[in-house]
Image (cartoon, helix red, strand yellow):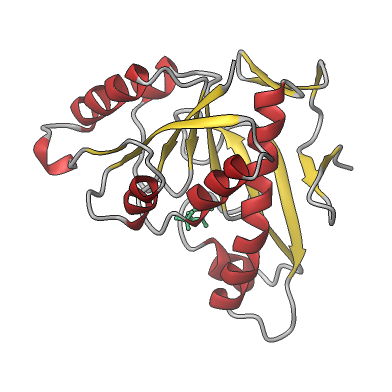
Amino acid sequence: MTFRLAVLASGRGSNLRALIQAQESGVLDTRIVGVFSDRPACAALAIAREHGIPAIAHRPADFGSREDFDESMFNEIEGVQPDLIVCAGYMRLISRRAVERFKDRMINIHPSLLPKYPGLDTHSRALASGDREHGASVHCVIPALDSGPVIAQAKMPVMAGDDSESLARRLLEREHPLLVQSVKAISEGGVELRHGEILWRGKTLQSPLQLNDLDQLEEGK
Ligand code: GRF
């Protein structure tokens, strides 16, 4: 049975596009069964519609509280029966209740080498700290922001002359295969999320998997 994905996005949607392309080219044996957003006009929803994927937006202003918004949004998400929820540039905090409802079934991509730099402005924070290395992480979603166990990372060097735009641009090129390969590993069962723990080929993952130059995930050192 095809593995069902729900994608949450708020903006540009390049990670969503990467998932769609991977699906269409057969790299992923998945089906994106819905794209959900808190921003009705965002590009990600338009991309979904172009590809015939149901695209659903809820406006936070229409709800009295974060809990009410999430209750409504995640009821819709549950309705498409996803095996996995992928937050791909979803810029809204998710309430504890919604996170717990989908425990072990929700992942997020974040543009830093977590646990470094949860939250915003990750590229400028990496530069300000003088980091020689930067990267992106795919992690399990837990109630605390950008803090769940890390499944996989893509690392890249910071070069002389880099600014936050150049870092963001170069990193995005690594984010796409990182997200695709992470979803692939979960959908094929190589990675399992169980009670907040990550299993890789049946054993507890000790450190995040790494995306190598061949765009494959391998055990981290
Ligand atoms: C990415 O950098 C992702 O890591 C972060 O938000 C950005 C989304 O980009 N969470 P896009 O909308 O997928 O192009």
In what quadrant of the picture does the N terminus appear?
top right
Tell me where residue 34 sits by quadrant.
top left
Q: What is the count of numbered marks?
A: 0
Q: Is residue 184 toward the left or the right of residue 157 in the image?
A: left
- 31 lies left or right of 49: right
Q: Residue at x 86, y 37 (%)?
A: 219
Question: In the rendering, at what x and y percent does residue 196 appear?
Answer: 61, 19
Compare residues 151 and 5 and report the one nearer the observer.
5
Is residue 147 something that shows in the picture? yes
Where residue 183 sits in the image (x, y, percent)? 63, 34
User: Picture coordinates of residue 25 (x, y %)?
Assistant: 64, 45
Towards the viewer: 145 or 215:
215
Q: Name the residue rendered at 67%, 37% in the picture.
A: 182
Asked whether the viewer can see residue 150, the reply is: no
Q: Tell me if 43 is positioned left or right of 29 in this view.
A: left
Outermost residue, right side: 221
Q: Position of residue 86 (x, y in %)?
A: 50, 35
Vertical arrangement, residue 119 with respect to residue 162, above or below:
above
Query: Most extreme residue toward the bottom, as rendered?
Result: 161
Seen from the viewer's position, the closer of residues 166 and 207 is 166
The answer to whether residue 148 is above or below residue 83 is: below
**Quadrant of residue 23 in the image?**
top right
Left or right: 120 in relation to 205 = left
Q: Quadrant of the C terminus?
A: top right
